Amino acid sequence: MCGVTEAAIAGLIISAGSAAYSFDQQNKNAQYQNELNEYNNKLSARNLADNMNTLAYNQNAERDAAVEQLWRDDLEARRAEARARVAAGESGVAGQTIESVMREIKAQQAMYASSVNQNLDRINDSMDGERRQIWNNYLSEIGNRTPGIKGSKMALGLQIAGAGLQAYNGYQEGKFRENYYKSRNTGTSSGGKGG
């Protein structure tokens, strides 16, 4: 059977070892969490870049389609003007009548161009909103990651000191009991033998 001193030392070693192991595990978990956050931040940044590039590509495609539509509308208006002039020349119509037809063709062309430009503006506004939403999602994703929390050296020291104090108290209590039982077995007590 081990004595009081050995039991106190064993208790201290076990408590200190447990505290040190816990501290080490906390640090390893914190390191793992931080590495995982760094990896996820890189993925989020890559996703952000991919989403922004896709959005820019789509916006450029919409702009190109609008420019092509404006070009086709302008071409169609010029053809309509040319057909109207040829028809007027063949029929002998001139003056106010032909000018009225030309104004109508130009007004329609301006209306079509305005419609295409308004649609493009709406598309651009929508895509700007998507761009802001993509950016806000990225910031939210990054901001919601919990950093790893390392073990506290102060807490470790206090746990070990507490274990030492507990071991010392256990030692003192064990010594007191040991002395108490020795004195009872030998027949001496603090009050002495009365007679």
Image: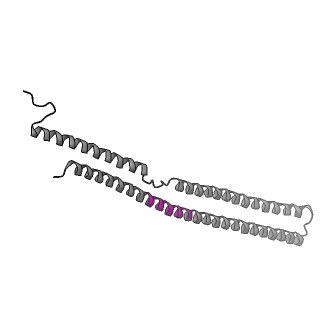
The answer to whether residue 65 is above or below residue 20 is: below
Residue 155, given in percent of the width and then of the height, sits at 40, 48
The quarter holding residue 98 reads: bottom right
Residue drawn at x 44%, y 57% as measured from the top left: 30
Tell me if residue 152 can be seen: no
Residue 21, given in percent of the width and then of the height, sits at 35, 56
- Asked if the stretch drawn in magenta spans residue 136, the answer is no
Question: Between residues 174 and 166, which one lies in front from this camera angle?
Answer: 174
Residue drawn at x 59%, y 64% as measured from the top left: 49
Q: Quadrant of the C terminus?
A: top left
For the image, the number of numbered tags is 0
Residue drawn at x 64%, y 65% as measured from the top left: 56
Q: Is residue 181 left or right of residue 37?
A: left
Residue drawn at x 50%, y 53% as measured from the top left: 144
Question: Between residues 94 and 18, which one lies in front from this camera angle?
Answer: 18
Magenta highlight range: 30-45
Tell me if residue 4 can be seen: yes
The quarter holding residue 131 reads: bottom right
Secondary structure predominantly adopted by residues drawn in magenta: helix
- Furthest toward the right, the residue is 95
The answer to whether residue 90 is above or below residue 32 is: below
Question: Between residues 74 and 177, which one lies in front from this camera angle?
Answer: 177
Q: Is residue 76 left or right of residue 34?
A: right
- Asked if the stretch drawn in magenta spans residue 33, the answer is yes
Question: Between residues 154 and 87, which one lies in front from this camera angle?
Answer: 154
